[in-house]
Image: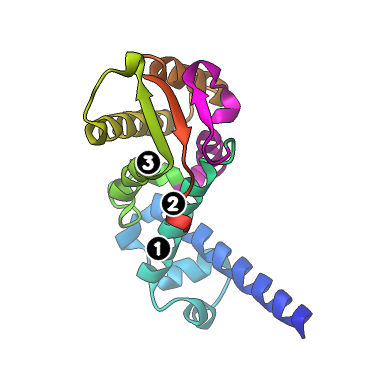
Amino acid sequence: MNNELIVTSQHRNRTKEHLKTALIQLIKKKGFHGVSVKDIVDQAGYNRSTFYLHYQDKYILAEELLIMTLEGLRGEVGKPYWHGQKVSTNKLDAESFQIVDYIYEHRDFFELIQYDDTLPGLHTGFPQTILKIYQEQFVFETINNSPVNMDYFKYYTAYGFFGLLNNWILSGYRESRVAFIKNVIELTKTHIHSFHYVGNTFES
């Protein structure tokens, strides 16, 4: 019985992934508002009844795609660290930026940022997720412990990093992952001395 449930769950998840992939591909071709449920099922190789077993409409599908991918981004950030770890920015390396690997591995999704008629909520949700990561998971120490409004500092730093990520995506990932991270680290060292990783509070 348990094996049957596992197989059913795996089949359901696989079907949903196919539908999400189809939606991403179609947005790039037609824009989100030009995509119909029929387009999605035709692209994925299913029928409409299969779609409606999982989603009420394309908006529910789009919302789940957005939420799951951005929450995955938030979960990826802390993988190189343990709770309470203090890290000097002089010690940062390519392995410190799992978030960049995640974005590249999910590049079909994140490339949607370059379209005007794109996944609803992506243009605001992506940078806001970066900000939440800075707010929830890190405590920063400035260079020479310079006193700053830390809310402003995190906002400034998070949206600066988002700008770099956005430019990297829009360039077609022209820089290699290693070169991109190296440049981000050099910039980071100009205003952050170190940070404490305080964990994924969104999971608690």
Q: Residue furthest bottom?
A: 1
Q: Amino acid at mark 2?
A: Thr
Q: In the rendered image of this protein, does residue 115 appear above or below residue 163?
A: below
Distance from label 3 to label 1 (Cα)? 20 Å
Q: Which residue is mark 2?
A: 201
Give x and y (percent) for residue 4: 75, 82
Q: Residue at x 35, y 68 (%)?
A: 59
* Image-based side of 96 in relation to 195, left or right: right
Distance from label 2 to label 3 (Cα)? 14 Å
Q: Is the residue marked by circle 3 packed among few (<14), some (14-19), or many (20+) residues within 10 Å?
A: many
Mark on residue 62? 1
Q: In the rendered image of this protein, does residue 8 appear above or below residue 194?
A: below
* Image-based side of 178 in relation to 40, left or right: right
Name the quadrant containing residue 176.
top right
Name the quadrant containing residue 151.
top left
Q: Is the residue marked by circle 1 packed among few (<14), some (14-19), or many (20+) residues within 10 Å?
A: many
Q: Amino acid at mark 1?
A: Ala
Give x and y (percent) for residue 18: 57, 63
Mark on residue 130? 3
